[in-house]
Image (tube, rainbow, N blue to C red):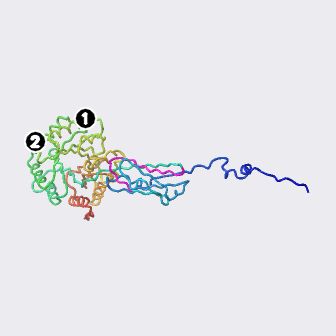
């Protein structure tokens, strides 16, 4: 039988023929797909209060599966500090706690690196200053008749709740007068003696010039000169514009009020979220005036996220068509949330009909006036809301 020499195949050739991928030849192993997403706070919950700890979590995946335990995730934001700043995953999730220190709209970032691949996720947060207790702002557009009126109920309410700030808007003759009226003077005196505060009502016709700046200034001066600084603690500028084009008009009015007394409080009522510049022409802005149903869907993030950089007592709401005590309590509870960030509140069951443009929701106090007082006091004290009749 003929002898055949041994057939020797070079090791490299064998590798090429049978073990190409295992020996490193051909295409390289693809890099892993790294996914990272911030899972807490939830997207629906974006508004928080400074110095209140916020739970933050990030989910990390590799090729769709949970990242190995111990994968490091770094957290950062210019608006505060994390404890810890870098957290390790467990079952694919890393958790930390954020303490916010800067109010306003902020960006939260989570970053992870694995096998040389880096993934990043961002989340928008809004941080508001620590809120002051709620105040009640009453459009007291009713006459203080002899023998008992809603002004007497205002004074009684202030006496019954000495820890609650009550502010009433005085409106004699729609703010146009040349002398004091005895009944309004007495009502204002009784209310301030009970601990309340009084603002003088001045309408501005939306800065169109239909009412001149000089007329508005004269109106303001009559409150201070005739009713006196001892009774008038500020001015309520109604029918305020919301567009940036009218800012100069209101800046002149604001400057005039502060020139009379820098401590006078200026409230402006555009009834909606105005341009950001209005923060410089009013100490407090009525950012919502409308129905209780409408207030339930009020969301400043859509049109005025700049409001979160401001304290809640620089923002007010006036709600009408809140037909029951329960509806009123719902509106007050909404006002107290970080989302709405309101500081001055009012709700009434009196009706304004938008279809016919009829009705005066401020002509009397609401039927649930005493419950409104008790509800705001309970919210401020962190207590259960009082029962409705």
Residue 105, can we see it? yes
How would you rate the neighbour count of disc 1 (Cα within 10 Å): few for under 14, some for 14-19, many for 20 or more? some
**Which of these two is toward me, 389 or 97?**
97
Work out which residue is located at the far left of the displayed protein and give it: 182
Q: Which mark is residue 158?
A: none
When asked about the image quadrant of residue 268, the answer is: top left
Quadrant position of the C terminus in the picture: bottom left
Can you say whether 3 is above or below 178 in the image? Answer: below
Q: CA distance from mark 1 to mark 2?
A: 25 Å
- Give the residue at x 32% y 44%: 306
Q: Is residue 326 left or right of residue 149?
A: right
Residue 48 in picture, x, y percent from top left: 34, 53
Q: Which mark is residue 248?
A: 1
**Which of these two is toward me, 34 or 86?**
86
When asked about the image quadrant of residue 1, the answer is: bottom right
Residue 378 in picture, x, y percent from top left: 24, 61
Residue 74 in picture, x, y percent from top left: 44, 52
Q: Which residue is mark 2?
A: 225
Identify the secondary structure beneath mark 1.
Answer: helix
Asked whether disc 1 touches disc 2, contact meaning CB atoms under 8 Å apart, the reply is no
Identify the secondary structure beneath mark 2.
Answer: helix
| Mark count | 2
Is residue 209 magenta-colored?
Answer: no
The overriding secondary structure of the stretch rendered in magenta is strand
Is residue 100 magenta-colored?
Answer: yes
Residue 317, can we see it? no
How would you rate the neighbour count of disc 2 (Cα within 10 Å): few for under 14, some for 14-19, many for 20 or more? few
Residue 308 in picture, x, y percent from top left: 32, 48
**Which of these two is toward me, 59 or 361?**
59
Mark toward the start of the polypeptide (1 vs 2): 2
**Which of these two is toward me, 195 or 5?**
5
Q: Which residues are magenta?
A: 97-115
């Amino acid at each position: 039988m003929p002898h055949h020499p041994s057939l020797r195949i070079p090791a490299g050739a064998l590798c090429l023929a049978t073990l190409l991928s295992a020996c490193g030849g051909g295409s390289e192993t693809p890099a892993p797909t790294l996914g990272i997403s911030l899972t807490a706070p939830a997207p629906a919950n974006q508004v928080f209060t400074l110095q209140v700890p916020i739970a933050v979590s990030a989910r990390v995946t590799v090729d769709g599966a949970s990242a190995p335990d111990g994968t490091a995730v770094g957290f950062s934001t210019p608006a505060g500090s994390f404890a810890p700043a870098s957290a390790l995953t467990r079952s694919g999730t890393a958790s930390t706690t954020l303490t916010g220190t800067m109010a306003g709209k902020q960006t939260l970032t989570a970053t992870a690196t694995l096998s040389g691949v880096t993934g990043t996720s961002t989340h928008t947060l809004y941080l508001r200053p620590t809120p002051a207790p709620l105040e009640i702002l009453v459009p007291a557009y009713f006459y203080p008749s002899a023998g008992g009126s809603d002004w007497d109920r205002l004074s009684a309410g202030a006496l019954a709740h000495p820890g609650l700030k009550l502010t009433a808007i005085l409106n004699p003759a729609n703010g146009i007068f040349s002398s004091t009226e005895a009944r309004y003077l007495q009502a204002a005196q009784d209310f301030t003696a009970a601990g309340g505060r009084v603002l003088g009502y001045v309408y501005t016709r939306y800065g169109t010039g239909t009412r001149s700046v000089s007329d508005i200034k004269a109106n303001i001066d009559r409150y201070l000169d005739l009713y006196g600084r001892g009774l008038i603690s500020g001015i309520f500028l109604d029918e305020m514009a919301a567009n940036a084009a009218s800012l100069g008009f209101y800046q002149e009015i604001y400057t005039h009020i502060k020139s009379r007394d820098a401590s006078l409080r200026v409230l402006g009522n555009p009834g909606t979220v105005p341009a950001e510049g209005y923060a410089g022409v009013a100490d407090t802005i009525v950012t919502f005036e409308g129905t209780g149903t409408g207030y339930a869907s009020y969301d400043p993030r859509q049109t005025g996220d700049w409001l979160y950089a401001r304290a809640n007592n620089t923002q007010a709401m006036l709600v009408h068509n809140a037909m029951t005590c329960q509806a009123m309590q719902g509106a007050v509870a909404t006002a107290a949330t970080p989302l709405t960030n309101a500081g001055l509140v009012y709700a009434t069951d009196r009706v304004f009909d938008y279809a016919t443009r009829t009705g005066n929701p401020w002509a009397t106090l609401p039927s649930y006036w005493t419950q409104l007082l008790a509800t705001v006091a309970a919210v401020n004290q962190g207590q259960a809301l009082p029962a409705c009749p």
